[in-house]
Image: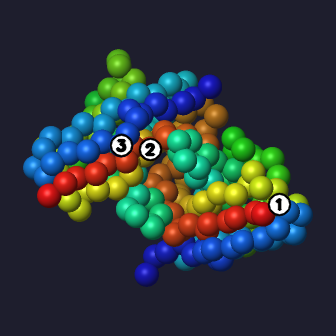
Amino acid sequence: EAQVTQNPRYLITVTGKKLTVTCSQNMNHEYMSWYRQDPGLGLRQIYYSMNVEVTDKGDVPEGYKVSRKEKRNFPLILESPSPNQTSLYFCASSIPITGGHGELFFGEGSRLTVL
Amino acid sequence: GNSVTQMEGPVTLSEEAFLTINCTYTATGYPSLFWYVQYPGEGLQLLLKATKADDKGSNKGFEATYRKETTSFHLEKGSVQVSDSAVYFCALSGATGGFKTIFGAGTRLFVKA
């Protein structure tokens, strides 16, 4: 079954304690991306990756890091989480098309609370 | 910069009512336009898309037409069902600046039996 898998689905942590949210896709997609969803703001893009070792900032990259060492994996790293990073996070993947990317396939989301 | 504006919700309708959710965009270049739907507790999934002006996307009774002259991509359905209750997001990608995706704030739809 084609899918995007995120872990953990739920996490409560404390300010400053480094954490990683993993994302894996089994569709051989070149494009992967992270979003955060906050009430009234929709989804905002954090980082995206066009392929292995190619990443770029989205609209809200501050406080986050990513890496793309393998095509299927795109982990999101919070080196020193703060309460304003409490949010619902989604990973997505897609294929590139001329000038952009196609349909996004989303994971089920990771709800993060930073105390 | 590029942006997407959706009508604010929530929208509450009775079953079999007509649905319109407005979406307008600002973009340079020629973006692709999408509607995604999010059911409670789930991730987003594609509802329909259009990649060029005057294209009509359709799926599950929903339709939207890419109107470049009015920079709009309004979502419509002729007869909603309780199972259509969800949050709907309008989005664009592929405008100048390429691989970023811009989402609207989302519109929550409640359908009453």
Residue A56 in the image, given as x and y percentages of width and height: 75, 48
- To the question of a shared chain for discs 3 and 2, the answer is yes
Q: Nearer the viewer, residue A9 or B24?
A: A9
Q: Nearer the viewer, mark 3 or mark 2?
A: 3
Secondary element at tag 1: loop
Q: List the residue tagged with mark 3.
A: B10
What's the mark number on residue B1?
A: none
Going 76% across and 63% down the picture, which residue do you hit?
A114
Q: List the residue tagged with mark 1.
A: A81
Q: Amino acid at mark 1?
A: Pro
Label 3: few (<14), some (14–19) or many (≥20) C-alpha neighbours in 10 Å: few
Q: Quadrant of residue B11?
A: top left
Extreme front residue here?
A115
Q: Where B95 falls versus A3 (above or below)?
A: above
The answer to whether any part of residue A18 appears in the image is: yes
Q: Do callouts 3 and 2 mark residues in contact (Cβ within 8 Å)?
A: no
Going 28% across and 30% down the picture, which residue do you hit?
B54
Secondary element at tag 3: loop
**Which image quarter is the C terminus of chain A in?**
bottom right
Extreme bottom residue here?
A1
Secondary element at tag 2: loop
Residue A83 in the image, given as x and y percentages of width and height: 77, 55
- Mark before the other along the chain sequence, 3 or 2: 3
Q: List the residue tagged with mark 2.
A: B106
Q: Nearer the viewer, mark 1 or mark 3?
A: 3
Q: CA distance from mark 1 to mark 2?
A: 26 Å
Q: Amino acid at mark 3?
A: Pro
Q: Where B82 falls versus B64 (above or below)?
A: below
